[in-house]
Image (tube, helix red, strand yellow):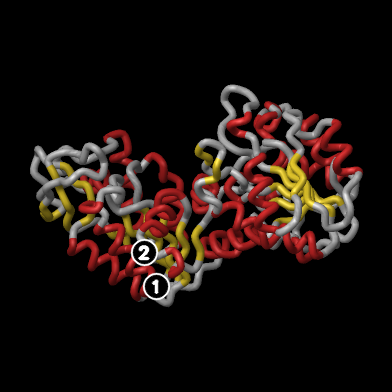
């Protein structure tokens, strides 16, 4: 995938209507935004377009919208917060049709530097369907230029992510990426395609199945692949170890053997836990007090389960990170929501925080872990996209990135 994309710095927005696809999929409780990280992340691109004299039309989805349009998933609270953050009115178009008469009229009246926010794009069922041509065209009719700054949605070929770009292009407009998208492409894309070596990749999380293609792709790109989390036990069982009642995917044992063979053939290091933190049962509730002990990874008792890496493994993994120049991490090392079982994840986060390497956290649980443990500001980049980050690490083409114009 070509990663040299036109950005907001390459387009002339003055006097132009600019449709910006943001990721305002924020958590709401009783109509109040409980985490505004995504709103803050969108501000640099929006401010740049305002300063350039663009007429800025923002759009985004929010929630899953399973039961049709409803006020609980309206973007009204986002418009209010954006107005406060930008210090100017962000006019909200509450029409459930998204691109109807209310939006058309409001856009026609815009002055340079004005900002409008359209209603939740998923209120139009066509946003997510294969036959979203009409909605894509209506979105493009509102604008002269298009900017995608929603990396978290860029792995989906939706009307407001990919469909709209064809119609913008057809009328001679340009499709660019915003600052947030550019940062994701620079860090995630280039880390995988052109890493400064040694390149260490760390994969955790519960299931091997979720990371099949990521494991295979990263083995070809990295120098050392570290495996932790629940998926480690499938690898250990594939090696012939007794793993007790630990989480194992028996259908993926052959795959794990293949990956270990692949690592050996490519002369790549594949590190698995040498010891593990075990308990009688999974904690219930998840943060409950729990009695644990640490045993060698090949000596897990038949009636116990592994729930975190052990202290020797923490040292082994920290040592591997020390010499790295690029580190990508996706997935925790254990049940990090439990303080007793968070030690492995904390140790890995700490080793990343202390290295001079470029450190990239691939969204999802690892991003939540790094932030909740207070290491967020020590990382080079924390991705805003869970699924999109994983697909990038798999080497897949992301529709939202591919649809942006290449720099000529």
Q: Is residue 125 left or right of residue 380?
A: right
Label drawn at residue 224: 2
**220 up-or-down from 286: above or below:** below
Query: Does residue 326 appear in this view?
Result: yes
Name the spot of residue 405 as percent of width and height, x first. 76, 55
In this view of the protein, which residue sits in the foreground, 13 or 360?
Answer: 13
In this view of the protein, which residue sits in the foreground, 104 or 357?
Answer: 104
Q: Is residue 367 left or right of residue 280?
A: right
Query: Does residue 408 appear in this view?
Result: no
Q: In the image as oriented, which residue stretches furthest toward the top? A: 67
Residue at the image position 75 percent from the left and 33 percent from the top = 98
* Distance of label 2 from label 1 (alpha carbons): 9 Å
Q: Mark 2 near mark 1, Cβ–Cβ under 8 Å?
A: yes
**100 up-or-down from 283: above or below:** above
SS class, disc 1: loop
Q: Residue 352 occupies which quadrant of the picture?
A: bottom left
Label drawn at residue 152: none
Q: Earlier in the sequence, mark 2 or mark 1?
A: 2
SS class, disc 2: strand
Residue at the image position 67 percent from the left and 42 percent from the top = 60
In this view of the protein, which residue sits in the foreground, 196 or 73?
Answer: 73
- Position of the N terminus, as image quadrant, is bottom right
Which of discs 2 and 1 lies nearer the camera? The answer is 1
- Position of the C terminus, as image quadrant, is bottom right
Name the spot of residue 324 as percent of width and height, x first. 39, 72
Using a 10 Å C-alpha cutoff, classify the residue at mark 2 as few (fewer than 14 neighbours), some (14 to 19) or many (20 or more).
many
Name the spot of residue 146 as percent of width and height, x first. 78, 50
Q: Which residue is mark 1?
A: 324
Residue at the image position 13 percent from the left and 51 percent from the top = 298
Name the spot of residue 300 as percent of width and height, x first. 11, 47
Residue at the image position 55 percent from the left and 42 percent from the top = 32
């Amino acid at each position: 995938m070509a990663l040299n994309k036109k950005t907001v710095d390459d387009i002339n927005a003055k006097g132009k209507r600019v449709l910006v696809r943001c990721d305002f999929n924020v958590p709401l409780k009783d109509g109040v935004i409980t985490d505004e990280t995504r709103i803050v992340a969108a501000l640099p691109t929006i401010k740049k377009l305002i300063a350039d004299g663009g007429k800025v039309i923002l759009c985004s989805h929010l929630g899953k919208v399973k039961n049709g349009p409803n006020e609980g998933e309206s973007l009204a609270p986002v418009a209010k917060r954006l107005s406060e953050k930008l210090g100017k009115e962000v006019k909200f178009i509450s029409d459930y049709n998204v691109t109807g008469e209310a939006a058309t009229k409001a856009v026609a009246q815009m002055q340079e530097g004005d900002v409008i926010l359209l209603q939740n794009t998923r209120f139009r069922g066509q946003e997510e369907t294969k036959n979203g041509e009409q909605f894509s065209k209506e979105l493009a009719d509102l604008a002269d230029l298009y900017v995608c700054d929603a990396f978290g949605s860029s792995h989906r070929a939706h009307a407001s992510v990919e469909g709209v770009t064809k119609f913008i292009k057809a009328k001679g407009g340009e499709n660019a990426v915003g600052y947030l998208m550019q940062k994701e492409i620079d860090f995630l894309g280039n880390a995988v395609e052109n890493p400064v070596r040694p390149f260490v990749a760390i994969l955790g999380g519960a299931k091997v199945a979720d990371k099949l293609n990521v494991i295979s792709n990263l083995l070809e790109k990295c120098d050392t692949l570290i495996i932790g989390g629940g998926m480690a036990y499938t690898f250990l069982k594939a090696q012939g170890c007794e793993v007790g009642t630990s989480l194992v995917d028996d259908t993926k044992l052959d795959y794990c053997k293949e990956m270990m063979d692949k690592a050996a053939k490519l002369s790549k290091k594949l590190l698995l836990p040498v010891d593990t933190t075990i308990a009688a049962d999974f904690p219930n509730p998840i943060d409950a007090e729990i009695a644990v002990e640490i045993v060698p990874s090949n000596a897990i008792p038949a009636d116990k389960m592994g729930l975190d890496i052990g202290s020797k493994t923490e040292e082994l993994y920290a040592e591997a990170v020390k010499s790295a120049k690029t580190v990508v991490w996706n997935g925790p090392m254990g049940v990090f929501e439990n303080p007793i079982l968070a030690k492995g994840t904390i140790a890995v986060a700490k080793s990343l925080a202390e290295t001079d390497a470029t450190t990239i956290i691939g969204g999802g649980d690892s991003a939540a872990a790094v932030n909740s443990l207070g290491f967020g500001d020590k990382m080079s980049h924390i991705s805003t996209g869970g699924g999109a980050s994983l697909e990038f690490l798999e080497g897949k083409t992301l529709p939202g990135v591919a649809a942006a114009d290449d720099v000529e």
